Image (cartoon, rainbow, N blue to C red):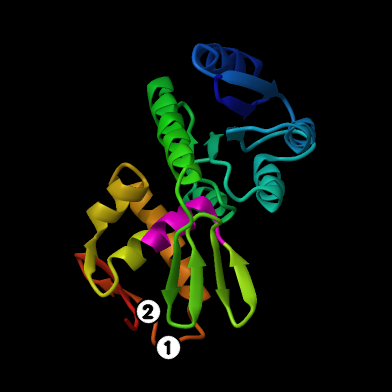
Amino acid sequence: MNKKILYVEDDSTLAFLTADNLEQTYDVCHFTNGKEAFDAFTKDDFDLCVLDVMLPEMDGFELAAAIRERDVEVPIIFLSAKTLKEDRIKGLRLGADDYLVKPYSMEELVLKIEVFLQRSQKNGSQKTSVYTLGDYTFDAVNYTIERNGSSTQLTEREAALLQLFIENKNTILKREKILTSIWGTDDYFMGRSMDVFISRLRKIFKNDERINIENIPRVGFKLVAPD
């Protein structure tokens, strides 16, 4: 059975070209406004979401936030003509997995879709993996981290990044290794994305001074934590 993709784009020409390409491999449900797309998301199961940012009724950022409230696992890719760094960072902070700027390469879009779908399938087939980190308990399959009865829900990307750090605890990880392991590429923008996710993880551990994700200048990062 083909994977099902929620595709939201109000530019009819671009939507036709993109959907036509994607439909060769996937089941594509195309919508032209955010509200209709979210209504569909609440009634059906999708394997991945491809969202334009500038949409009528509910823009892409609002749509992504609403999707994340219901599902923290489904991969989200933004497609947008908005090129400002702040817009990209905003999309990633909302829990998006990637942000492609228009005009984008269809080959690149399909490649990224495949990477995220394969990662989701791999994570879905994993046995339960629970890690202890200081006073925290991290469930790598359900993307949750708990401390003193309080639970925080992570996104899939945050969970993958934290799991990589834990499995290499007290060891320096080069930026290139982190990027290729989690993002599949080590380009500049993905490096900026990684910094955002690391900052979010640091906030989770801010109340335990024994745990810190140290920045190793010009090299990478190291998760410092008790054994």
| Range covered by the magenta-colored residues | 154-163
Q: Pointer 1: residues within 10 angstroms few (<14), some, or many (20+)?
A: few
Residue 212's disc is 2
Residue type beneath disc 2: Asn
In magenta stretch: residue 214: no
Quarter of the image for the C terminus: give it. bottom left
Asked whether residue 15 appears in the rendered view, the answer is yes
Q: Is residue 162 magenta?
A: yes
Q: Residue at x 71, y 49 (%)?
A: 70
Position above or below: 135 against 99: below
Residue visible at 22% across and 68% down in the picture = 172
- Secondary structure mostly seen in the magenta stretch: helix
Count how many numbered circles sit on residues in the image.
2
Residue visible at 26% across and 58% down in the picture:
175
90 left or right of 197?
Answer: right
> Is residue 195 shown to the viewer in this render?
no
Q: Position of residue 9 (x, y in %)?
A: 64, 26
Q: Position of residue 59 (x, y in %)?
A: 70, 40
Quadrant of res 82: top right
Residue 115 at x, y = what percent? 40, 35
Compared with 102, 59 (above or below) is below
User: Could you say which is closer to the camera, residue 131 or residue 61?
Assistant: 131
Tag 1 residue: 209
- On residue 139, the disc is none
